[in-house]
Image (cartoon, helix red, strand yellow):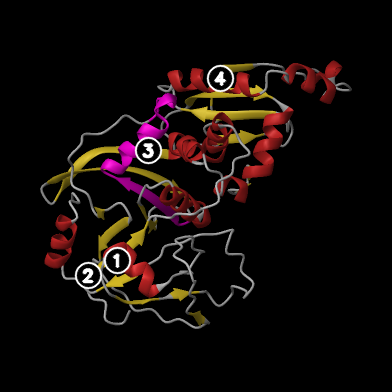
Amino acid sequence: VKNITKDDYVFFPKKKNIIKTSKFSKEELYILGWYLGDGYISMKNKNQLQIFLSMDQEHIAKNLVNILNNLDPNRDRLVKEHYRNNINKGKLKISSYIEKNKLNPACYKKHKTKECLIVQITSYKLTEMCYEYCGTPNNKFIHEDIFTDKNNIYFIAGLFAADGSLNNGRNYDGYNRYSCSLTCTEKHVIESVREMLFNQGILSSCRKQTLKKINFNDQYECCIYNEDINKLSQIYNSFDIVKPIKKHVRSSFIETNEGYWLKIKDIQVKDYEGYVYNIGVEKENTYIAENIAVHNCISFGLALLQAEYNEVRGVIPKDTKENTNFNQKSAKLMLRNRFSHSNLKKLLNANNIQQ
């Protein structure tokens, strides 16, 4: 690793042999994504789920209403049972609708607009699902069942639809560069989204944003570039959120059937104290845990690249226990390859791989 220099390439293998299970429907995952991004459950009425949208997103609001109605078709009976003792107090609301609402300026004083759309449903089933798998409005998280779900791309779709933004292209070294980004104050949420995208074959990058002019906490951003936006768009095209972008735009990486090659733009040396492990496995396996690379240097390298690897390292932070559950988390596997840029191009071209 110490021999890595700027303009070398880092290889990220596509993950294989991952256990694929699912306990959610695609629509449930989609709504959970919306709740994590722009959803709210009142502490006074814990059975009322609200999702906030801008005034120009009425077609999306109507779509959400249809999905919510279909997810809990028996909510009338369930809500009546839950509110049996409170019907006379006027707390019984059994409906799903779009409502124009004027926000309190004191709550959103940094926003220029005062109006929004609210999609609202009273459903014990849906609010309990949101609480269990994404937390309370003040303490949201991504449950491990969502992280390991084989269809969690629909969760990401809802999250990007709620809190994501699409840049239609800017000049970047003479090329148009398109990006779809997600911003959040919770670092662990952004890292989880990045790993879920990577498990679905979509490469993204994460960075920290420090807002000095506004009294906010640091924010973290997950960005998808260029044709990877098309991959995300095609997967959940039925939800009509992200429009496909133009093809043949410049990519920031070289993709093969086995993984991605990324050029190293900068190297920083940082102090570290803690344990360092070198972990090997008998059989090739790309299932890896956070900050840990599980590898077989010789056979894995020969099978993938017909090349010779220098070394592979996996680092565990000092606060990580030795009994880390490798089946719960995942991370990047970085392999050092000694090919120059020109030799790498020759290797890829020899295998009929398009840049």
The tag earlier along the polypeptide, 2 or 4, is 2
Question: Label 1, label 4: how many angstroms apart (C-alpha)?
Answer: 45 Å
Mark pair 1, 2: CA separation: 7 Å
Q: State which tag comes first along the sequence, 1 or 4.
A: 1
What residue is pinned by disc 2?
8
Q: Are marks 3 and 1 in contact (CB under 8 Å)?
A: no
Q: Tell me the CA gap for discs 3 and 1.
A: 24 Å
Residue that mark 3 sits on: 232
In this rendering, the answer to whether 114 lies above or below 194 is above
Report the amino acid beneath label 1.
Answer: Val
Tally of numbered tags: 4
Q: Is residue 323 left or right of residue 33?
A: right
Q: State the extent of the magenta-drawn residues as a range.
A: 217-241
Residue 10's disc is 1
- In this rendered view, identify the residue nearer to me: 216 or 336: 336
Quadrant of the frame with the N terminus: bottom left
